[in-house]
Amino acid sequence: MEEKKIMLSGIQPSGDLHLGNYLGAIKNWADRAQEFDCYYFMADLHTITVRQNPADLRRRSMQQLAAYIACGLDPEKNTLFLQSMVPQHAQLSWVLSCYTQFGELSRMTQFKDKSAKHKDNINAGLFTYPVLMAADILLYQPHYVPVGADQKQHVELTRDIAQRFNSIYGDVFRVPEPYIPKAGARIYGLTTPGDKMSKSIPEGCVFLMDDPAVIARKFKRAVTDSDRENCVRYDPENKPGVANLMNIYASVTGKTFEEIEKEFEGQGYGVFKPAVGEAVIETLRPIREETDRLIKDKAYLESVYKEGAARASYIASKTLRKVYKKVGFVQI
Ligand code: TYM
């Protein structure tokens, strides 16, 4: 039998999961869960590059695990784990940092954005964050890394680091491909169609656990365009707000932009916006209900992350051992 290809990805539990995380990443993971051997984790080590409240971080990590399962990631078939429980991530990260250039890290957009936002805390972790992400990935030798468009640069750096290491030591790492969805790769804020949807602008951000009434209200208030054309047409340059809503609608219904234009022909935004809201509410409803149910089952979640960490650690230790040997560390 042919071996399954490997997929791996993670999300930082630095905020509650939102529609951007779902459409840009998790939905794509769950859709492929049968086909691939999958590793999905809570990137908790990454979150402390920005100050966190410890109790909130713990709560969100567990809620995120429950949400992964509720979104369709079966822990029997996928390895679900917390990054901080698998020490090989930090260990490989150190080695890879010695094969990554200062200049490369200085060019990372996310570093530039975050250091502009957190001027009082531009710590070394914020700078070396992409190296940890490279370690997260390369430990599991994945073929694909399913992420939203904003993470593509980090996956490309991972490829460069892997190729550099391989060119010195032989084929140690598989060089992975980013796997970016056609629809949903970049979801913008509902009130700020120029910025990606993120927890930092909560009015325009739809959280997975939001109440249906709250979601409906957020979509009703979504920014459309200023040309008063009042016509549902895909034109991201001139009508970014409408294009974003169409993109969301396309992702949750599987319809094409032409089908959507036809569906709302002759109808204005007053009909279109609530329809998108309704489609999102119905997509998220079962996820919210199942997350709510799972979050109460602490013993079950504990068994999932313990088993996940053991499996992840087993695989990760094989790659780490190879790396240690190649660079010349004495083997136990
Ligand atoms: P993070 O936690 O910011 O986001 C998690 C995933 O959600 C996607 N995403 C979006 N997609 C579409 N539209 C949006 N508005 C939107 N916002 C977020 C992101 O592209 C990502 O796929 N560094 C990573 C976490 C990470 C990781 C990894 C990912 C750590 N190690 C190893 C893959 C592999 C991050 O900060 O993503």
Image (tube, helix red, strand yellow):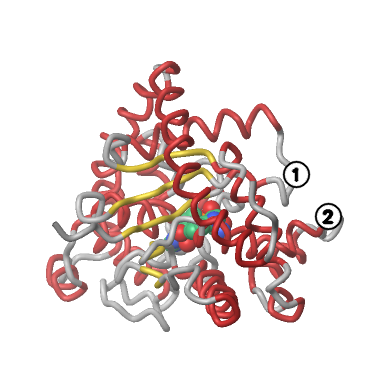
Q: Is residue 204 left or right of residue 212?
A: right
Q: Position of residue 216 (x, y in %)?
A: 35, 43
Q: Is residue 244 above or below residue 83?
A: below
The residue where tag 1 is placed is: 51
Q: Position of residue 128 (x, y in %)?
A: 72, 63
The residue where tag 2 is placed is: 121
Most foreground residue, 73 or 131 = 131
Labels 1 & 2 near each other (Cβ < 8 A)? yes
Q: Amino acid at mark 1?
A: Arg
| Residue under the point 25% across and 44% down | 283
| Residue under the point 43% across and 53% down | 21
Q: Whole-Å distance between the Cαs marked 1 and 2?
A: 9 Å
Q: Amino acid at mark 2?
A: Asn
Rendered image quadrant of residue 131: bottom right
- Say which element carries label 1: loop
Q: Is mark 1 within 8 Å of ligand 1?
A: no
Most foreground residue, 307 or 133 = 307
